[in-house]
Image (cartoon, rainbow, N blue to C red):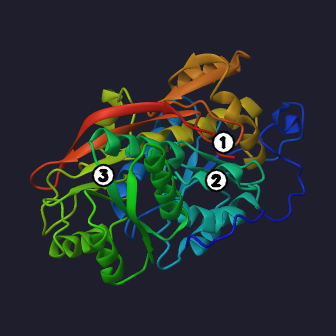
Amino acid sequence: MGSLALAGCGSDDSGDDKTASDDKSSTGAKKGDGTLTIGTLLPQTGDLAFLGPPEFAGVQLAVDDINAAGGVNGKKVVQSKADSGDGTPDIAGAEVDKLLAAKSDVIVGAAASGVSVSVIDKITGSNVVQFSPANTAAGFDTYDDNGLYFRTAPSDILQGEILANRIIEDDHSNVAIMGRQDFYGEGLSKRIEEVLKEKGATVSESTLYSADAQNFTAEVNKIAASKPDAIVLVSFNETSKIIPQLIAKGYGPQDVQIYFVDGNLSDSYKGFDLTGVLATSPAPASPNAEFIARLKKQPGVKDTLTYGAESYDAVVISALAAIAGKDDSGTTIGANIVDVTREGTKCTEFKECAELLADGEDIDYDGKSGAADMTDSGSLVAGSYGIYEYKKGNKYDEIDNVSGVVPQSN
């Protein structure tokens, strides 16, 4: 939930951080067991389960490519899978225990920021890297994570700005915001409101709802009473319950302009018409057609490809960091992740990058999701977002793509 405090991670007896020179040294004692183990904490169940197939597929393709190129430090990468759920009910903690028992060096996930913040202390406190392909909450940039948390999705500081700018460009000036009361929903709702007001728009209502609510009558009544000319829903799959209530109040998609975000951009909605709804979600500015074709062939992957490329890149970056540090331990990987994403020789494929590292080169990996340059806090320096529009049948198409540098939070 959004009331979670950004507390520290607990004890850190290694003194590690993202610039720890002792872990980067190839002369130090080996800390890993010699085999890079990738754990996946991704949604198989819950309101974000539609994101699971492309994320699991992205991880699998990365593992396949790495192993086809010789693996990491002479051994093949192995994988252990777990279900993150969506936080209601909370199953992530027990699933993390399974991944840690499987000797995971890197845990890819969770998809939901609220789930990730509930397990980040357990993961990073165990000297294991947590690497999310989908977390966007701004609060991770200042979280005390032992230098072991990273993400390949841009911060909501940028998403909020891009979405608010789009609303202004669409000539809306009286906007209502309805968001989940959790780590993700509170932060993104606040950022959208902040930028809208900076641009001169009125935010007629901004209301948060419990993520496990059974109905949304009170919040929808507030939205309707504010008589907005546009509505932003910062939601997950509970959107399927909210939209009918908005329609009943005369504020559905055919009455006012509605905007979604990455958490509720899905093609699975039934029973109502979303034609004309717009949404934002992280998306490569120049999609890799070959990778997309491979992703679509993976089991379970249908039309939704969101975060598939980001999942692939999280695994490849972790593997390259293990090669750079000549060790597969989480602390060594964490100490090298930022370095392999910036200020070196450009490379875009695992094999190419691994060969450069073997020759003593410093590398700058750009992946399937685009440029992967990271700040010292483990977040992307810049990002790009697709602007999507729903058509008849509740399918959506990308109609624009906007890139920007991520404003740094204080």
Mark 3 burial class by Cα count in 10 Å: few <14, some 14-19, many 20+ = few
Mark 2 — residue? 140
Mark 3 — residue? 299
Mark 1 — residue? 378
Residue drawn at the location 55% of the way across and 42% of the way down: 314
Residue drawn at the location 52% of the way across and 42% of the way down: 154
- Can see residue 59? no
Tags 1 and 2 in contact by the CB under 8 Å rule? yes
Whole-Å distance between the Cαs marked 1 and 2? 9 Å
**In the picture provided, is 380 more to the left or to the right than 326?**
left
The image shows residue 191, relative to residue 270, as above or below, that is above
Is disc 2 placed on a helix, strand or loop? helix
Residue drawn at the location 51% of the way across and 61% of the way down: 184
Q: Amino acid at mark 1?
A: Gly
N-terminal of the pair, mark 3 or mark 2, is 2
Whole-Å distance between the Cαs marked 3 and 2? 32 Å
